[in-house]
Amino acid sequence: MRKAEIEQLLAAALAARERAVAPYSRFKVGAALLTAQGEIVTGANVESASYGLTCCAERVALFKALTEGRRDFLAVAVVADLPRGATPCGACRQLLAEYAPEAAVYVADSNQPAQWREFTVRQLLPEAFDHFEGGK
Ligand code: THU
């Protein structure tokens, strides 16, 4: 992806991060997905008093996009207030491997978005379990 497109996607993730609902951890994360049609779908983490129900920014963005009919994803940007940024958790890696296997993953510190790191979904989750045949 071109630098300007990556920066635009990171900017969308930064804006989404402001809308995080993280009253427990106070750790705000923003994510932005780019579709093959050039649309950007954003998400932010949403926490629950029942902590385990928390949903990460990446999955919020992915679930929004999928349920709005988007299927083909070129990239996802993730920003958080952490040196070098926060890479997606294991659960999000699984969902990305299933629904955005070809997406480039851009991760950045929200204070230094110009210094992103780039990964492939396969790098983040090699040998992913991504489909199954019917039971025997
Ligand atoms: N979180 C994300 O939204 N994405 C990540 O990649 C890492 C963690 C959220 C979940 C929780 O609301 C908070 O960050 C602390 O774990």
Image (cartoon, rainbow, N blue to C red):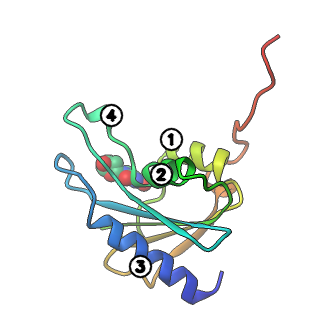
Residue annotated with mark 3: 11
Name the secondary structure under disc 1: helix
Decide which of tag 4 and tag 2 comes sooner along the chain: 4
**Disc 3/disc 2 C-alpha distance (Å):** 18 Å
Q: Are marks 4 and 2 in contact (CB under 8 Å)?
A: no
Which numbered tag is attached to residue 91? Answer: 1
**Which residue reaches farthest bottom?**
4
Q: CA distance from mark 2 to mark 1?
A: 16 Å
Residue at 71% across, 38% down: 130
Q: Earlier in the sequence, mark 2 or mark 1?
A: 2
Distance CA(mark 1)–CA(mark 3): 24 Å
Disc 4 element: helix
Q: Which secondary structure, mark 2?
A: helix
> Could you classify mark 4 by the number of other residues whose Cα lies within 10 Å: few (under 14), some (14-19), or many (20 or more)?
few
Residue 128, above or below 75: above
Which sits earlier in the primary sequence, circle 1 or circle 3?
3
Marks 4/1: CA distance? Answer: 13 Å
Amino acid carrying label 2: it is: Lys
Per the model, the C-alpha gap separating discs 4 and 3 is 27 Å
Image coords of residue 56 (percent x, y): 39, 49
**In the rendered structure, which amino acid carries the disc numbered 1?**
Ala
In the displayed structure, does residue 84 sit left or right of residue 67?
Answer: left
**To which residue does mark 2 refer?**
64
- Amino acid type, mark 3: Ala
Could you say whether the residue bearing mark 3 is in a helix, strand or loop? helix
